[in-house]
Image: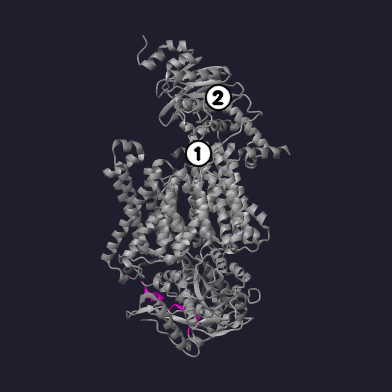
């Protein structure tokens, strides 16, 4: 019996604690990063680093509101790609008095309400599903990431004129299912371009039968909307069967994991084309290269782990980190504009501020639009020798420079 | 009105310090939402729903002794059912009931399929069931929307859920207590200790095990239904084998034999989760993974202490009272004709005829290997004869086992209650669960009857049977067989290894049973006892009956002499 | 026709590995009455330690792993598996088995399983891994693949099947022809009698655990380069092996066949399609497990005499 009492007391004591006081004289403000650290470690890390970079800069400049100097700090919570955990994390974030949440997007449909009840703004920086963002019904949800809708339409716009018979493949992850829906809408007027539609099991690592089925349907191109593991698996299955069909993907094709999986067969990566938000602005490559330099000096170079044929190490360009960086900067700007650190005021002020994004574009929201990346800003890049370059047969992409990706 | 007064009175009598502690703990726990914020309260509520499911599991693991590793799957069934109903607008209480029904159906199915297996096999089967359900949830998007999950909106606040969960856990613990004490629980405990002996006492082992697993599934289903509403989204990844493992850990850590053991285990798990958060932050490892690791290590440590867990099993006290106990057994005859049985090439019995009449003791004797035990098992109905028939005219048959097979953890009183449980009419699942006044009255009457039987057989009432001397255990076995209300008793070697005094006690007991009008068959090696005790002797040799008559006649029979002494008659 | 060939090739390759794991499960059960819930995770441990020793944490390419290094890595990996398996037996399983506490060893072996699994996931957190292939299959046929009548058959899969069968044969020879094998048989017949007779039962059983781990681990490592895998995939060998063993109630002679049947079922579910009707890869785990469980349940209800 005594042991039970001891355990009870210990539980209560430990449950109560969990907050620490800041050693500095500045009042802390928490920004929570809700990401898939345990299941998609690269993605989680890059979002976290982007947020931290912005926080470093804001703290260096000082965030003064109504006479008090505040210090931003980042707390990370792991979703493990589980919607239920994402919901629990959102509760925890609100409980920790977070002023904003940078979210990868898993489980937002279930968790946004919890943040909304407390007035906390959420910045989605990866998932692009259409229903996630709605300024009217979900006033606290913002997004800085290419939308599925935009990506799907751009892909359709790019591929259909080529006269290809496309196999639309998506995996059954959160991300893939949303993408599948967007693709279905984008290709709805041009069913003749679609050879077959397939759902790929997200956890299966051998997709031979599905690829075989696409081949049998006489597809001349594969559009694979899924997490990096799925893309790698499709490439492996197709190329190992001797099928050199062109493969197109959303931004996940650029995830280093794809190249890591295929390090054994670099020639299988050649020709892989992905759509993504452009990393450079009309003003040129300057802002992005500056951002990349800042990122690398804080967090080191992100190596893919593969080498080009010439033997140079390939590095990752921080794309999603940019979006997280931009959102945190917008939040800081909103705090200053609102003159308050109360989340509801910050949320309202987010509709009124703009900042210069990491890539040089102006980023901002307004009452009717909570999308930070315009559909027109989506470009295409093709892999060759483990690095990618913008394609030449698309009007926007043709104008973009190739960014160096080796060290 | 008197029913309430009676119940209240019983509560007053049965109250102990432990009960005060339990009530105090619940009262304090109910105030928790005042101290903690929304997030923590939601976490605690989730933990309590887990505790509730664990209490359900504790019944299957502790009382029934079944290592069920599918509790997570039953929680999943409840969650799936509830998620769909809630999405369709059905209110939470109905959805929870539906979840419970789903869970109990799943549990019943699993029990029906696998309860025949020995425990290792049951563990393996339920483990695979857990994995199968996890795969189904992930692959078949209809169940829980695959990776996206099914959004479940609305419902009570976190505090509301917390109080609900607390109440539910308390109810589950009460239900556990009621069922564990009831004849159902006792018989399951007997089957857990010694399955063959329990079956010999007429315990429907398989059926009760199915009930146990179904009951644990029902609790899991209800808990899962409420929990999915709390989580706000039905997420397939939350219901994998790890959940089954966690529930198992909670039951082991807390103590499977105590109703509040599981909640105590949850507390420990909660402490662990906070520790894991801390460790995770130190090592920059995602907290979830640190949690799993720590849980696993903790279980290894705990199990090494012997699985009694933190909370001890409560002492069981039973009240005797007036009322009609079981009816007297009616006299019956057993006629066996032309019995034959072969195991492969070995003929164990051939053309064996035995007649057992009421008020008589028939002895079955023969050298080792003559087939006595096989004949006994056929007479008892344990095995089917290849040829011949066994007819019992109005009455049932009970048998004691050759080895001393008492249930080591049950007291003699409980032994007799297990045996007499088959004659009760007010001890079904629902009545036991709700501890109705009628059930309690019948309980008291049967306890009084049991005490009387034990006094008659000279056995202590409340000491665990494993601690009794061997002859007392033997006497207890006969007492239990007697308490089943069988009219025909088959007693296997009652005086084996007994001293003269002890043998005399046995023969005295058997004589008194005969005088009461029972029909007795005694298998005996001790020919002196046979001469003093038996009215009739049947001699077996190599599976055949070689003599059948009064002790004197048989003793003079040449064939019998030859069989025993190995000499031709002269 | 093409589909049938594909099913046979991939199903047989996977099935022989399942069968070897099933034989390991059967051996353990016959010796100790314990179901080795941590078997799959210990196999995964062997696979990943070998990977770590061979290629570090870098992505794997042909140029990065030489033959000698791989051999060394293999030895290290198998050694770790052997030690971990024997350790699991002595520290976690034997204390509770000796007490006759079923709940005890069930809990203990599950705890070992999850502890090992979590440890692996902490170190190997990528969604999938590529295993180096020391044997030059990529130089055979078309980059390691035969194209036969519309079907693509990985040359490796034939190798894996043959290698696993050879391993099974060696294992049988070991059990039947050596003194060690006969001692194990004696222990399986009657544990207590073996103790009385003076056999060093503890050591022998520990050695048997270690060998079961090494055998199955070797098969898994041979199979690993065939496709991308992660901790879950490696540990799943244990699950399928357990199902195959349970269905034949841990009879080592039939366990191999049961494993192969399971592998073929799985391959069939993934590949077969009749017109538009098909199950597809989403059901590659669900259907074999469901069918296996149904079969197990049927046997459990009808043949109780067999169970001891």
Residue B404, relative to residue B153: is it above or below? above
- In the image, the segment drawn in magenta is A264-279
Number of numbered markers = 2
Q: Which residue is mark 2?
A: B455
Residue at far bottom of view? A283
Residue A287 point in image, percent of width and height: 47, 87
Outermost residue, top side: B570
Chain bearing mark 1 = B
Between B306 and A301, the residue placed more toward the observer is B306
**Residue carrying label 1:** B192
Image x and y of residue A242, in percent: 40, 72
Look at the image and say whether residue B162 sits in the magenta stretch.
Answer: no
Image coordinates for residue C98, horizontal then vertical, percent: 39, 41
Q: Which mark is residue B59?
A: none
Instruction: Inspect the magenta stretch and tell me whether residue A274 lies in it.
Output: yes
**Residue C147, quarter of picture:** bottom left
Which of the two labelled residues, at mark 1 and mark 2, occupies the earlier sequence position?
1
Indicate the quadrant containing the N terminus of chain B: top left, top right, bottom left or bottom right. top right
Check disc 2 and report its element: helix, strand or loop.
Answer: helix
Q: CA distance from mark 1 to mark 2?
A: 26 Å
Name the secondary structure under disc 1: helix
């Amino acid at each position: 019996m005594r042991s039970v009492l001891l355990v009870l007391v210990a539980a209560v004591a430990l449950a109560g604690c969990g907050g620490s006081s800041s050693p500095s004289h500045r009042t802390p403000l928490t920004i929570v990063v809700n990401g898939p650290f345990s299941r998609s470690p690269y993605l989680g890390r890059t979002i976290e680093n982007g947020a931290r970079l912005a926080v470093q800069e804001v703290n260096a400049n000082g965030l003064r509101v109504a006479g008090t100097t505040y210090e931003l700090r980042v707390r990370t919570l792991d979703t493990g790609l589980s919607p239920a955990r994402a919901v629990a994390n959102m509760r925890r974030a609100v409980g920790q008095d977070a002023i904003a949440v940078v979210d990868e997007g898993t489980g937002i449909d279930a968790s946004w309400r919890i943040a909304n009840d407390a007035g906390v703004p959420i910045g989605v920086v990866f998932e692009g599903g259409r229903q996630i963002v709605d300024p009217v019904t979900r006033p606290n949800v913002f997004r800085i990431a290419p939308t599925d809708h935009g990506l799907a339409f751009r892909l359709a716009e790019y591929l259909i004129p080529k006269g290809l018979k496309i196999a639309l493949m998506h995996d059954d992850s959160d991300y893939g299912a949303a993408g599948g829906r967007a693709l279905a809408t984008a290709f709805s007027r041009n069913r003749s371009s679609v050879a077959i539609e397939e759902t790929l099991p997200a956890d299966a690592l051998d997709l031979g039968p599905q690829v075989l089925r696409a081949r049998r349907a006489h597809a001349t191109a594969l559009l694979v909307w899924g997490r990096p593991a799925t893309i790698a698996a499709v490439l492996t299955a197709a190329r190992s069967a001797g099928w050199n069909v062109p493969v197109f993907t959303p931004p996940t094709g650029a995830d280093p994991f794809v190249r890591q999986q295929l390090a054994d067969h670099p020639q299988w990566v050649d020709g892989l084309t992905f759509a993504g938000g452009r990393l450079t602005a009309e003003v040129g490559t300057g802002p992005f290269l500056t951002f990349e330099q800042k990122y690398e000096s804080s967090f080191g170079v992100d190596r893919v782990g593969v080498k080009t044929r010439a033997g140079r190490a390939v590095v990752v360009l921080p794309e999603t980190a940019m979006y997280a960086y931009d959102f945190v900067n917008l939040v800081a700007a909103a705090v200053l504009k609102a003159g308050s650190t109360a989340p509801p005021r910050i949320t309202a002020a987010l509709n009124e501020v703009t900042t210069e994004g990491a890539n040089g574009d102006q980023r901002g929201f307004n009452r009717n639009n909570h999308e930070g990346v315009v559909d027109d800003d989506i470009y295409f890049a093709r892999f060759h020798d483990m690095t990618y370059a913008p394609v030449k047969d698309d009007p926007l992409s043709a104008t973009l420079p190739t960014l160096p990706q080796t060290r | 009105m008197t029913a309430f007064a009676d119940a209240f009175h019983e509560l007053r009598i049965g109250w102990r310090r432990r009960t005060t502690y339990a009530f105090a703990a619940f009262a304090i726990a109910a105030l928790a939402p005042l101290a903690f914020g929304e997030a923590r309260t939601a976490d605690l509520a989730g933990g309590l729903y887990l505790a509730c499911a664990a209490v359900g599991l504790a019944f299957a693991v502790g009382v029934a002794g079944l290592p069920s590793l599918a509790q997570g799957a039953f929680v999943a069934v409840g969650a799936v059912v509830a998620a769909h109903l809630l999405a369709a607008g059905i209110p939470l209480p109905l959805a929870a009931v539906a979840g419970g029904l789903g869970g109990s159906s799943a549990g019943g199915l699993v029990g029906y399929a696998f309860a025949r297996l020995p425990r290792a096999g049951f563990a393996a089967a339920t483990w695979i069931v857990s994995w199968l359900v996890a795969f189904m949830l992930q692959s078949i998007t209809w169940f829980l929307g695959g990776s996206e999950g099914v959004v479940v909106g609305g419902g009570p606040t976190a505090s509301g859920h917390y109080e609900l969960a607390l109440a539910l856990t308390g109810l589950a613990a009460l239900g556990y207590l009621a069922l564990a004490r009831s004849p159902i629980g006792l018989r399951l405990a007997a089957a857990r200790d010694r399955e063959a002996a329990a079956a010999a006492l007429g315990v429907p082992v398989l059926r009760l095990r199915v009930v146990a697993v179904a009951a644990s599934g029902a609790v899991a289903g209800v808990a899962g239904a409420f929990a999915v509403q709390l989580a706000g989204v039905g997420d397939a990844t939350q219901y994998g084998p790890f959940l089954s493992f966690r529930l198992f850990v909670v039951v082991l850590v807390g103590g499977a034999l105590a109703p509040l053991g599981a909640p105590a285990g949850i507390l420990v798990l909660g402490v662990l989760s906070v520790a894991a958060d801390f460790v995770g932050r130190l090592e920059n490892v995602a907290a979830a993974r640190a949690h799993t690791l720590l849980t696993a290590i903790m279980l290894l440590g705990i199990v090494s202490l012997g699985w009694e867990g933190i909370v001890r099993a409560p002492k069981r006290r039973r009240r005797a009272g007036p009322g009609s106990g079981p009816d007297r057994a009616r006299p019956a005859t057993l006629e066996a004709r032309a019995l034959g049985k072969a195991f492969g090439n070995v003929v164990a019995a051939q053309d064996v005829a035995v007649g057992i009449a009421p008020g008589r003791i028939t002895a079955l004797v023969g050298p080792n290997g003559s087939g006595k035990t096989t004949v006994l098992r056929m007479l008892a109905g344990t095995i089917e004869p290849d040829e011949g028939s066994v007819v019992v005219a109005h009455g049932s048959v009970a048998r004691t086992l050759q080895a001393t097979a008492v249930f080591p953890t049950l007291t003699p009183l409980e032994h007799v209650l297990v045996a007499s449980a088959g004659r009760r009419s007010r001890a079904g699942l629902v009545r036991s669960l709700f501890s109705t006044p009628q059930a309690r009255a019948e309980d008291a009457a049967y306890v009084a009857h049991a005490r009387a039987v034990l006094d008659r057989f000279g056995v202590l009432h409340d000491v665990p049977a494993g601690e009794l001397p061997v002859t007392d255990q033997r006497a207890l076995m006969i007492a239990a067989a007697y308490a089943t209300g069988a009219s025909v008793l088959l007693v296997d070697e009652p005086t084996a290894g007994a001293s003269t005094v002890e043998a005399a006690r046995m023969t005295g007991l058997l004589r008194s049973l005969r005088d009461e009008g029972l029909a007795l068959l005694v298998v005996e090696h001790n020919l002196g006892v046979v001469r003093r005790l038996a009215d009739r002797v049947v001699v077996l040799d190599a599976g055949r009956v070689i003599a059948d008559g009064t002790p004197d006649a048989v003793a003079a029979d040449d064939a019998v002499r030859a069989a025993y002494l190995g000499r031709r008659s002269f | 026709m093409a589909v049938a060939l594909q099913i046979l090739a991939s199903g047989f390759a996977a099935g022989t590995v399942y069968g070897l794991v099933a034989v390991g499960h059967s051996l353990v059960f016959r010796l100790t009455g314990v179901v080795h819930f941590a078997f799959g995770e210990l196999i995964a441990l062997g696979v990943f330690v070998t990977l770590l020793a061979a290629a570090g944490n870098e992505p794997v390419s042909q140029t990065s792993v030489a033959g000698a290094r791989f051999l060394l890595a293999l030895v290290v990996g198998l050694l770790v598996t052997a030690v971990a398996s024997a350790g699991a037996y002595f520290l976690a399983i034997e204390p509770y088995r000796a007490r006759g506490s079923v709940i005890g060893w069930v809990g203990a072996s599950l705890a070992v399983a999850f502890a090992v699994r979590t440890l692996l996931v902490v170190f190997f957190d990528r969604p999938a891994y590529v295993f180096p292939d020391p044997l030059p299959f990529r130089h055979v046929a078309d980059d390691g693949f035969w194209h036969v009548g519309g079907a693509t058959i990985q040359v490796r899969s034939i190798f894996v099947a043959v290698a696993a069968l050879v391993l099974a044969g060696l294992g049988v020879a070991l059990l039947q022809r050596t003194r060690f094998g006969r001692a194990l048989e004696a222990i399986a017949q009657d544990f207590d009698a073996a103790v009385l007779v003076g056999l060093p039962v503890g050591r022998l059983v520990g050695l048997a655990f270690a060998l079961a781990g090494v055998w199955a681990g070797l098969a898994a490592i041979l199979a690993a380069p065939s496709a991308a895998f992660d901790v879950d995939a490696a540990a799943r060998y244990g699950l399928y092996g357990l199902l195959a063993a349970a269905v034949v109630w841990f009879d080592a002679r039939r366990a191999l066949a049961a494993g192969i049947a399971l592998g073929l079922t799985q391959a069939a579910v993934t590949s077969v399609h009749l017109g538009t009707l098909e199950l597809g890869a989403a059901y590659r785990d669900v259907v074999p497990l469901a069918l296996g469980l149904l079969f197990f349940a049927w046997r459990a209800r009808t043949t109780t005499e067999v169970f001891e």
